[in-house]
Amino acid sequence: MISTEEIKRLSSGGGNVVADDGTRIGGIGQVYLDDQTSNPEWVTAKTGLFGTAESFVPLAQANLSGNDIVVPFDKDKVKDAPRVSDSDGHLSRDQEAELYRYYGLDYGDAGVDSGRSSGDGQGLGQGQGQGQGQGRGNGDGRGAADTVGHDTSGPTTDSAMTRSEEELHVGTQDQESGRVRLRKYVETEHVTETVPVRKERAVLEREPIDEANLDEATTGPAISEEEHEVVLHEERPVVEKSAVPVERIKLDKTADVEEHEVSEDVRKEQIDVDGDVEDTRR
């Protein structure tokens, strides 16, 4: 079992409550002591958004690892633990029994205690000893620190109450929302072009004999057999293809900012005064 002295040492170390596999459950919050034995029995782990919620974890099977408290429960188990009210610094027997049942532990003889008192830091060892030993016994309700009145809900430790309230801290977390890829593929398109082609054909021309062509016409034998051949040519379409660059395409990123509303309940402590008293607000 973890001792009170070990808990006092953890108070200034900024330790965490962690699972057996090393997963962080949450920061160490409050440690609750047994009213009769003063042994640490419960610890709260700071869970929820920005650690604004605290979940109770039993210390019966817990161990220490450096500044951390190692418990045999996973993070989801602890986060889903029953939420109990401890406004008076104690756990009632019903609350404690409910927590024991949730964690599958035997409540045993723990039900004879009226509750558990909370502490933090060095106040675990000193706050309980001084508050119980010195805050009681004087008829006028004054202890060693000369406090005015006495605390009817527990040990008298101070002459005032501290009013606290929760603050909402909102931030953002970056997460992947999608991916875009550039992929190049080939598709075939049928293209039709019109090109002029030249084709030669034979034309028979007849010329009458006159003085201009008489000499050419009478050259050679008067009567003979002969052949004259003309070679004809024609053009045919020729297709050639070549790859040429036409444009460059690349991916870039831009960010748009949108306004999102976040709603959450925050608790504020209020202090009411019963009786006739002068309010000396500073």
Image: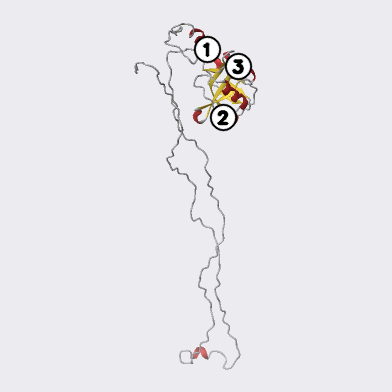
Q: Secondary structure at mark 2?
A: helix
How far apart, in angstroms, are the residues tagged by discs 3 and 2? 27 Å
Q: Earlier in the sequence, mark 3 or mark 2?
A: 2
Residue 122, visible in the rendered structure: no
Q: Residue at x 60, y 29 (%)?
A: 77
- Residue 79 tag number: 2
Q: Residue at x 55, y 15 (%)?
A: 8
Q: Foreground mark, 3 or 1?
A: 3
Front in this rendered view, residue 255 or 137 = 137
Which corner quadrant holds the N terminus?
A: top right
**Quadrant for the C terminus in the image:** top left
* Residue type (three-letter) at the residue carrying disc 3: Val
Q: Is residue 56 left or right of residue 135?
A: right
The CA span between labels 1 and 2 is 29 Å
Which of 147 and 113 lies nearest the eye of the viewer? 113
How crowded pointer 1 is (Cα within 10 Å; few <14, some 14-19, many 20+) is rated as many
Quarter occupied by residue 61: top right
Kindly indicate the quadrant of the structure image that contains residue 94.
top right
The image's colouring method is secondary structure
Left or right of 279 in this view: 258: right
Residue of label 3 = 112
Image height check: is 92 above or below 251?
above
- Residue 217 shows in this picture: yes
Given contact means CB atoms under 8 Å apart, are the residues at marks 3 and 2 in contact? no
List x then y, in percent, for residue 214.
49, 91
Residue at mark 1: 128
Disc 3 and disc 1: Cα gap in Å? 20 Å
* Circle 1 SS class: helix
Where does the image place residue 257, in percent across and percent down from the top left? Answer: 43, 41
Chain-order first, disc 3 or disc 1: 3
- Between 49 and 164, the one nearer to me in the picture: 164
Q: Amino acid at mark 2?
A: Lys
